[in-house]
Amino acid sequence: MTSRIRNIAVGLVVRGDRVLAEEHAVIPGHHRFVRAIGGGIEFGERAEEALRREFREELGVELSSVELLAVTENLFQLAGEPGHEIVHVFAVGCPELEQLPFGAARPVLDNASVARWYRLSELAEGNPPFYPDGVTAFALRMQNREG
């Protein structure tokens, strides 16, 4: 990693008591974790545009709705290297993803990971950890808005 701040946009797809998250392969020197779907914001690109692009590139889908929930800061260590992100967190709607069965996994198109549903109660307990830090609380608020 480099010693720079990375700006990212991530989207939360919540259905019932679950959130769709990207399950990463185990990284040597780091514990198992899942991450909100999204990625880096490119120069000249707005956060919402980056989010829509990332969902197209990673899952081959178009988002039907996008709502900015918060902008947070994430300081972390990954395999012994420091990281620093400014995170734009969005609530997103996507009928194609929302219809994905709870037991199914959807391959991520631009890496070797998969997206699958995780129970919010388990993520809130850190099982597995859900990154960037703080996104579990936003997903829980979305669940409460639905119910």
Image (tube, rainbow, N blue to C red):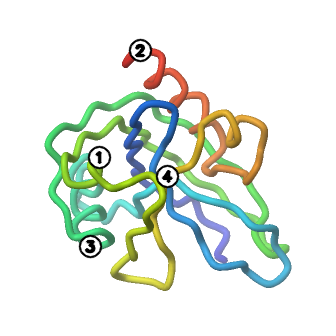
Nearer the camera: disc 4 or disc 3: 4
Q: CA distance from mark 2 to mark 1?
A: 16 Å
Say whether residue 116 is left or right of residue 146. right
Residue picked out by circle 3: 57
Q: CA distance from mark 4 to mark 3?
A: 19 Å
Residue picked out by circle 2: 147
The residue type indicated by label 2 comes to: Gly
Crowdedness of circle 1 by 10 Å Cα count: few (<14), some, many (20+)?
A: some
Q: Residue at x 47, y 72 (%)?
A: 114
Task: Please state the horizontal and vertical placement of residue 64, each as a whole percent of the image.
Answer: 14, 43
Label 4: element kind: strand
Q: Residue at x 80, y 84 (%)?
A: 28
Asked if labels 2 and 3 touch by Cβ distance under 8 angstroms, the answer is no
Label 2: element kind: loop
Residue picked out by circle 4: 117
The residue type indicated by label 4 comes to: Trp
Nearer the camera: disc 3 or disc 1: 1
First in sequence: mark 3 vs mark 2 = 3
First in sequence: mark 2 vs mark 1 = 1
Q: CA distance from mark 3 to mark 2?
A: 31 Å
Nearer the camera: disc 3 or disc 2: 2
Residue picked out by circle 1: 98
Asked if labels 1 and 3 touch by Cβ distance under 8 angstroms, the answer is no
First in sequence: mark 1 vs mark 4 = 1
